[in-house]
Amino acid sequence: MNNKKTLATVWLDGCSGCHMSILDMDERLLELLTHVDLVYSPLVDNKTFPENVDITLVEGAVSSDEDLHKIKMIREKTKILVSLGDCAVTANVPSMRNPLSVGAILERVSDGSVIRQPADVPLLLANAQPVHNYVKVDVFVPGCPPSANVIHSILMDLLSNRKTNINKITRFGA
Amino acid sequence: MNANNLNNSKAQTIRSNDDLLLCAEREKDRQAQYKQNLFVCMGTACQSCGSTEVLKALSSRIKDLGLEKDYLISPGGCQGNCSQAPLVSVHPQNVLYQNISPQNTNDIIGSLKGSPIKELSCDNQSSFFARQTRIVTEYRGLLNPERIEDYIAVGGFSSLLKVLTQMSPSQVIQEITCSGLRGRGGAGYPTGLKWSTVAKANDSQKYVICNADEGDPGAFMNRNVLEDYPYKILEGMTIAGYAVGANQGYVYVRAEYDVAVKRVENAIKNMQRLALLGNSIGNTSFNFNLEVRVGGGAFVCGEETALIASIEGGRALPSPRPPYPAESGLWGHPTLINNVETYGHIAPIIRNGSQWFANIGTQKSKGTKTFALSGCIKNTGLVEVALGTTLREMIFDIGGGVPEGRKFKAVQTGGPAGGCIPESQLDASIDYESLKSLGSFMGSGGMIVMDDSSCMVDVAKYFMQFCAAESCGKCIPCRVGTVHIYDLLNKITKGEASLEDLSQLESLCDVVQNTSLCGLGQGAPNPVLSTLHFFKDEYIAHIVDHICPAGACGPKGQDLRRPACVL
Amino acid sequence: MRVVTLTINDQLLSGRDDETILQVAKAHNIQIPTLCQLDGLSTWGGCRLCLVHIHGSDKLSPACVTKVTEGMVVETESERLNKYRHTIVEMLYTEGNHICSVCVSNNNCELQSTAQNLGIDHISLPYLYPSRTVDASHERFVFDPNRCILCTRCVRVCDEIEGAHTWDVAGRGINSHLITDLNEAWGESTSCTSCGKCVEVCPTGSLYEKGKAGGEMVKHAEFLTYIEEMRKNHK
């Protein structure tokens, strides 16, 4: 019988830097995988988010209707939701568009030629927002990106029910 | 040259009590020459309802009829019942005419010889008038605010000459202390104590400031008092200058109070003309001068340290106290700052004695206080009552209650730092302590009555918008916190808030109240806290049921989140 | 001047009676957070982070302006103070557009380190996302109002130390903002001496030198204490 915990990672509006940082754990990844099963992630092939995930790491801000739909679904299926990195925690770089209107942004990026929202592209929300503005978040890990060491110690602490003093090891922009 | 002119030239200045009495006698004689004296109210409310035209029409008609020697037409002060503006009073007939227009000129003049016109008269014996106790607004409507002689004829400046010639500065302070007078700007700090602190400060240069930067929504007491009794306020300031050892005073009036500014400037000129300001006042060694400073229109200018910064020519920003202005105020010198109404009490206390004053009011709140009654009430206007009067007497006996068909809901006192008091607490007495215990505040005297069509969340939102807009921006909790509180209230009134938002609202109120630099920020959460205390069910209705029970935030009973019908 | 003894956080300390609680605390290595106070400039009292409890007073007192007195008992830490400081710093983060990761002052920023020291790991208040325009018209420096916390250190240093008074605050409430001269572009300023003092005292990346990339801007406000010392001796 497998009594390993399940781990998922998701990538919303972010640069994937936090996922790169996860990979930076290098050989510690192998050790980690003796404690957890990675059940859903941009790094693995599973296409549907499974039920009852123990820990989900979220990278990225909530910027589009698709992000919003995803994060609500993920919250329902996750026990411990972790906002990983500044985009998830503060909306960071994606939020730099917020003082501008969505219309102005679309016009700018399409050089004025595309006026209508393309049907296959998710609708941008009015603002890119931190994850906790939409769903309850259990653990916040600031940093851009949080280092591999930080991610490792957070995960090890969560797996052994230890409380982490986040501010001792990372901060906004770190 | 006749005897009268000779007299005038002889009494160009007032250097002694005899000069003062002479001037008073002459003025009384002048007034007695007339069969009737007509006063047309020239307060802001009456003027905006056309009293200037009434005054013109009456004067020219009297002139046309050749009756100038029989009837004296004067611009008068406010009668208090501003909802019936324009008002004209006739003496000694003792009639008060209401809602007068130039069309009534002939009727009024016709009635001067006979009996008053019933249809135009207002019952000046009604409880609106009878239940008031007048100290600051004594001789209401019977003084021409432009003429210094009118004020002298009713005993004006006798207190000033009395203190200058018969009392030492410490005796004056002793008298004010014994009277129990407390600051009428709202906080209720003992006036005598404030004066003695400034008096004890060791500096050869001291200042006296009159705070007339009244900015509370719904408040117009200071405006009214300054417009009608400029001499009384300036006399009070001059006495204060003598008591604390200052030789210069400033009246800081907000720029919007056009009439008040003109009248105070005129009053200062007249006092200087009679040597009641300047050097060697009353032939003593006391020198004192006054100047008007017109405010820049920011609410925070009413905060004393910000007011001082504004007089100095800087940005009106409050600074942390201590040091209090009493130690280090205007240009770093000890400075006494009192509200208009506080100065309005000084001359009467000196004239009648501290004991007389201490007998009016309650144990801890002595004397009278003016209030500006406004909102959903029959008798809008300015009233002065003894402290200790209950809110119920104020609203229902004096104010006449809410208009027919409506139901009283709450009364807001204390301005943006005040609170909303519900029906169940109306038997509370109006004094500093009792209003504070109800989560409200005496404030400068605004009293806004609301009926059942007012939503308490919406009211709190209104005041928060005011505070956010008027925040000076110096300290973070007030600058940013008020905006967050406003946004949360806005979310509630749109039916979009959650119970977590409500607890965040409460938490933010706690932060802003306890960490803001000055009274504006510290008081800003009060309207929210007091409505949360007395009307929490209304907040819950907006949040849980998404409806506004009063029907102010959206149609009654309808889901606030429902988008408005586009058809 | 007199020497007084007082208690801060159960420690018995001494100080001069012309010193503030903040000064005495600092001299004894007791950290009280502040963002507007800076040694060598006049006190401002606007950030409210240095509020402390003084026994016998029901109001909190700003440590930067409150002078020490004999027998005073001060608490600089409590759950309540921590909540207040936490919320005030959160307010600053929501008021501007603070994107630490791309800021020239990343890792050298007083707002950032204050947030970290206070244990802030996310901002629970909603961000306001103001729209503010960067002024890069000066030949050597940039003013990015998105990162400004209105501590007015630049205003004070320019007025009190440099004597130029190029900087001031315009607008009120949430619309308060820094201006140069009579709200002209900084590069056009006729009063600015380009001394760079404002840049050195700025606690965030709001004022910085041109050519500095993310995390490269390190400030040196220490010069103020030397100037203060020299001016004192000059008297």
Image (tube, rainbow, N blue to C red):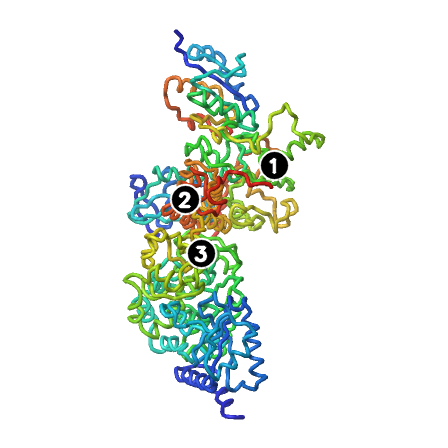
Which chain contains the residue that carries disc 1? Answer: A
Foreground: C22 or A2?
A: A2
Q: Position of residue B70 (x, y in %)?
A: 50, 86
Residue on which disc 2 sits: B538
- In the displayed structure image, the side of residue B356 where residue B379 appears, left or right: right
The amino acid pointed to by label 2 is Glu
Residue on which disc 1 sits: A100
**Same-chain check, marks 1 and 2:** no
The amino acid pointed to by label 1 is Leu
Neighbor class of circle 2 (other Cα within 10 Å; few <14, some 14-19, many 20+) is some
Neighbor class of circle 1 (other Cα within 10 Å; few <14, some 14-19, many 20+) is some
Q: Position of residue B179 (x, y in %)?
A: 31, 67
Q: Position of residue B83 (x, y in %)?
A: 47, 65
Q: Disc 1 on helix, strand or loop?
A: loop
Answer yes or no: do the residues labelled 1 and 3 have beta carbons within 8 Å? no
Q: Disc 2 on helix, strand or loop?
A: helix
Residue on which disc 3 sits: B303
Which chain contains the residue that carries disc 2? Answer: B
Q: Which numbered disc, 2 or 3, marks the residue that appears first in the sequence?
A: 3
Foreground: C134 or C122?
A: C122
Q: Residue at x 50, y 35 (%)?
A: C109
Specify whether residue B197 is in view. no
